[in-house]
Each structure stands twice: as C-alpha cells, then as structure tokens.
Image (cartoon, rainbow, N blue to C red):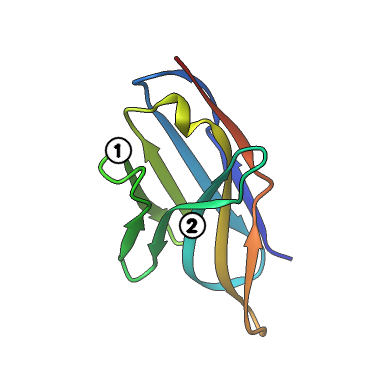
Amino acid sequence: QVQLLESGGGLVQAGGSLDLSCAASGRIFSISSMDWYRQVPGKERELVASIYFGGYTSFADSVRGRFTIHRDHAKMVTLQMRSLQPEDTAVYYCYAKITQVGRPLTSAWGKGMQVTVSS
C-alpha cells in the first residue's frame, strides 16, 4: 500500500512563506510525477504545481512566479510558496503517479492539509 504523507501546512500572514512537503512510502518501484492540488469549499480541486521526475515542472497561472517545486529525493517533493495571499487559502493535497513493485502504474492522494493566509 502506498501512502503520501504531507507536512508543512498552517497559518501565515499575507506576504509570508510556507513550504509543503510530500513523502511517499510503501513498496515503490518508481514515481513518475508528483503534484500539488488545492481546494476551497464549494469549488473544484485545482492543480497548483507538478514535477515530473525527469525534471520538468509546471505551475498554475495563479501561482507562477511565487511557487516553486523541487524534488528532495526519490520519494519526496517540496512546494515552496512565497508571497502568499489570502486567495491561496485552501486545503492542499499531494498526488503522485507511482509504479509499485510488481504492479502497474497507479496513483495516490494525500489526506490534505490546511493552509490559511491571513490578511
């Protein structure tokens, strides 16, 4: 069973910074990509940033230039959020496409964690 463990959420003032980390565990052969999504009540889950384990990254227009994503090691990525604004307030979820040992490509979601930006 693959699990994604998220850490780093919390409360920050507008203009501040937070780093969100996502670590995968389990019988993992390889990870193709890891993404961060966010969701506010009443809205669909929004893709914020992606990193493909060949090195390519992509960002939503709303966060480009403020957020970066990097790979800490084979099973962990960190989303660095800078110049945070109240509209960045949401529950943030980690998502990964994973190949497990002896199994085809699958995907997993983290449980999500709250990020609140106060004005």
Local SS, label 1: loop
Judge the density around disc 1: few (<14), some (14-19), many (≥20) Cα neighbours within 10 Å.
some
Q: Nearer the viewer, residue 108 or 28?
A: 108
Residue 62 in percent (x, y) is at 36, 43
Question: Above or below — where is 63 with respect to 32?
Answer: above
Q: Is 39 left, or right, of 51 in this rendering?
A: right
Q: Residue at x 66, y 69 (%)?
A: 27
Q: Secondary structure at mark 2?
A: strand
Q: Which residue was labeled with disc 1?
A: 66
In percent of the image, x 62 and y 47: which residue is there? 5
Q: Earlier in the sequence, mark 2 or mark 1?
A: 2
The spot of residue 54 in percent (x, y) is: 33, 71
Closer to us: 76 or 65: 65
The Cα–Cα distance between marks 2 and 1, rounded to whole angstroms, is 16 Å
- The relative height of residue 24 versus residue 65 in the rendered view (above or below) is below
Give the residue at the far right of this rendering: 1
Give how far across and how far down residue 68 sits, in percent.
32, 45
Quadrant occupied by the N terminus: bottom right
Q: Nearer the viewer, mark 2 or mark 1?
A: 1
Q: Is residue 60 above or below residue 1?
A: above
- Type of the residue with mark 1: Arg
Q: Quadrant of residue 108?
A: bottom right
Residue furthest to the left in view is: 65
Q: Nearer the viewer, residue 45 or 112?
A: 45
Residue 40 numbered tag = none
What's the residue type where badge 2 is placed? Answer: Asp
Image coords of residue 76 (percent x, y): 48, 53
The residue at the point 58 percent across, 57 percent down is 24
Labelled pair 2, 1 in contact (Cβ < 8 Å): no
- Look at the image and tell me in which quarter the C terminus lies: top left
Of all residues shown, which one is farthest toward the front?
Answer: 42
Q: According to the image, label 2 marks what residue?
A: 35
